[in-house]
Structures are given as C-alpha cells and as structure tokens.
Amino acid sequence: MDRYKIQQDKPTTYGQQWQCFKYVMYNQFLVQTPLIVGNYFYCQYFNVSFDFDDIPQWYILLAQCFVSLVIEDTWHYFVHRGLHHKSIYQYVHKVHHNFKAPFGMVAEYTHPVETLGLGLGFAWGVLLFGNHLFFIWAWMLVRLLEVTDVHSGYTVSLNPLHLFPFYGGAKFHDFHHKNFHGNYAPTFTWWDKMLGTEMKYDEDYDTEHDTVQQMKKTK
C-alpha cells in the first residue's frame, strides 16, 4: 500500500495509532454512548419503524443518503471553517489537527465539543428522513465510510466513493491536515470552490512524491 500513501514522507507509527486509539475510546464512551442511548429514545418517541416490511426501497435509501450527505457537507463546511477561527481553534479543533498526516482512526479523534457540534450535521438527515431504523443504519454506514476514507491517508483509483459527483476524497482532505487551512468541506468540493477556500494540492503532492522516490533511490 505504500505507493498509495499520500504523504509518503510521514509514515504512521504504532505510537500514533495507540495515542489515537486511547482518545477515540475515551470519546466513544463519554460522548458517543449517551448519543446511541438517546437514539433509542428518539426512535421510541417518534415511532420510527423497525418492521422488515416497511424498509424503504434501495433507490429511496440511496437518494435519502445522498441528500443527507449534501446537508451534512454544508453544515460541516461552515462549522469547520468557524472552528479554524483564531479565537476558537486552539481550544477545540487543534485536537483534531494533532495529526498532520491522518489515518482512518483520526476521523474520530476530536474534542468532545467538536464531536457534538459537527455531529449535528449527521442529525439533520435523521430528522428529515428517519422514518425507519434501516435508514438510520444506512446513513450511519455511508457517513462512517466517507469520513474514514477522507482521513485514510491513502488514495486509490478504484474507489467507489468517487462515483459521487464532486467527491473530494482523501487527497482533498489530507491537504487540509497538512496545511491547516482551506479544503474545509468533508465530502464535496463545491463549497470550497464557490467560496474561494479550495487549495490546489496536485502539484504540491506530485513534487513531494518525486522527492521521496528520489530519496529512496539514493538510499
């Protein structure tokens, strides 16, 4: 997989993985578990269906998940950009940027305040379309796959997520971690394009890749 790694000069170490794992587990129990319990009571209160016969058709689920992605992407862009403001950044979002070369688990390596704030973007899809538990599961799966992919640190040509129009992917978000600004949207590129925060990364990564390959040949 080394040839697919984006920042080839920054290999992931076991120490980084262990540091990330401990914090993510802390977040899972402190923040995520109450939210999961709350989801049960949400389903009960709003009479969300659990019945097999009521599962929406696959094309309806696909459309709902795509619209939910668009809504979440919009929410995430503006909240994420706000978290980079100098008056807030060092207290909350700096935690996530401890890793300049992210890997999959870094997707959940966030300050609890950020987890809740950005997590509201996921909730809008549930509030709009969550009339069946299967949709909630499907939407959660899509979101987890997407956020893990963009933090993976690897880019491969046969990635099915790139079938989505304007999907940014790992290379787009990896550049944000490397430079700490620009490319704020988590999924699509249109908000960054329209608002002038898209950072050009192809030339930068191509130069870095050539440098690393030359160093390997020298060794």
Image (cartoon, grey):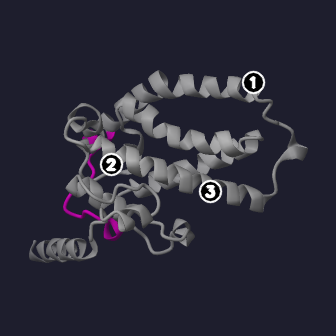
Q: Earlier in the sequence, mark 2 or mark 1?
A: 1
Q: Quadrant of residue 83?
A: top left
Task: Reply yes or no: does residue 9 show up in magenta.
Answer: yes
Structural distance between the alpha carbons of marks 2 and 1? 34 Å
Write down the residue under mark 1. 45
Seen at 26% across and 44% down, the residue is 84
Q: Is residue 61 above or below residue 218?
A: above
Mark 3 highlights which residue?
A: 67
Q: Which mark is residue 81?
A: 2
The disc at residue 130 is none
Q: Nearer the viewer, residue 202 or 69?
A: 69
Residues at discs 2 and 1 in contact (Cβ within 8 Å): no
Find residue 178 and report its horizontal and vertical position in percent.
Answer: 23, 56
Mark-to-mark CA distance, 1 and 3: 24 Å
Q: Is residue 191 left or right of residue 60?
A: left
Question: Foreground residue, 6 or 82?
Answer: 82
The three-letter amino acid code for the residue at tag 1 is Tyr
Residue 2 colored magenta?
yes
Which residue lies at the image location 73% right of the left edge and 29% below the top edge?
43
- Residue in the image at 27% along x and 66% along y: 199
